[in-house]
Image (cartoon, rainbow, N blue to C red):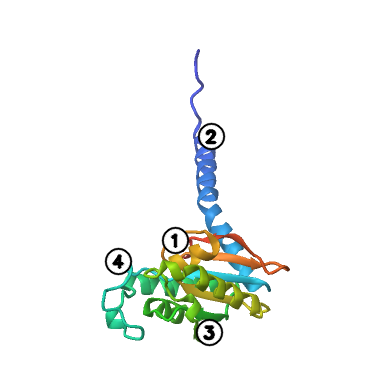
Amino acid sequence: MCFEPLLPSRRWLFAGLAALVFAVARAGPAAASDELAAKLAKPGHIAMMRHALAPGTGDPANFTLGDCATQRNLSEAGRRQARRTGDFLRSVGVSEARVFSSQWCRCMDTAELLELGAVEPLPALNSFFRDRAGGPEQTRQLREKIGELDLSQPVLMVTHQVNITGLTDVFPSSGEIVVLRREADGDLAVLGTVDPRSTQ
């Protein structure tokens, strides 16, 4: 069996096709994230965002609400991540939102660095990492709050992993956004997540 040498023109053709396939493969997840995030500009949707990168787990033993020096805080990488996420959301049409946040400093800082609107502290978004027994009641309060909200404008909530998992069963990474839709019967449907890497 003999093989015909691959002519230069054919080599360029195959190289071009390979580059196109690679580009489509890379663009796929980003395009999906763009489409999902763009739903937040439509009525009836909520974004639940885990605070940006804050090295460590939990909080120091001397944790004091309102005193950032006693808390786990955003790293510089986390602050950049939050800013870039705000830029990303604006790029898909979410230029302004009603923003709620846990009272923990790393969440408030994340919410403010997004620059999507004034930040409203919401105790129902506070971490129950140290008090898992209180988690179900706090999740119920959060569901109740979401049920009362006017969702004619974008709504974004910055909180903690335990709170998001308690509400949605999703375990988000730092800076990840879970997109929800409030159904007519009040139930919350998880539409998907926006990986923070896709916003960079």
Whole-number angstrom distance, CA of label 3 to CA of label 4: 28 Å
Residue that badge 4 annotates:
56
N-terminal label among 4 and 2: 2
Q: Which mark is residue 197?
A: 1
| Label pair 2/1, CB-CB below 8 angstroms | no
- At label 1, the amino acid type is Arg
Q: Which residue is mark 2?
A: 10
Query: Which residue is labeled 3 in the image?
Result: 117
Q: Amino acid at mark 2?
A: Arg
Can residue 177 be seen here? no
Q: Nearer the viewer, mark 4 or mark 1?
A: 4
Q: CA distance from mark 3 to mark 2?
A: 54 Å
Q: Nearer the viewer, mark 3 or mark 2?
A: 3
Disc 4 to disc 1: CB gap under 8 Å: no
x then y, percent, for residue 179: 58, 65
Residue at horizontal 30%, vertical 66%?
Answer: 56
Mark with earlier residue (3, 2):
2
Spot occupied by residue 44 in the image (x, y as percentages of width and height)? 67, 72
Q: Nearer the viewer, mark 2 or mark 1?
A: 1
Q: In the rendered view, does 58 fall on the left or right side of 150?
A: left
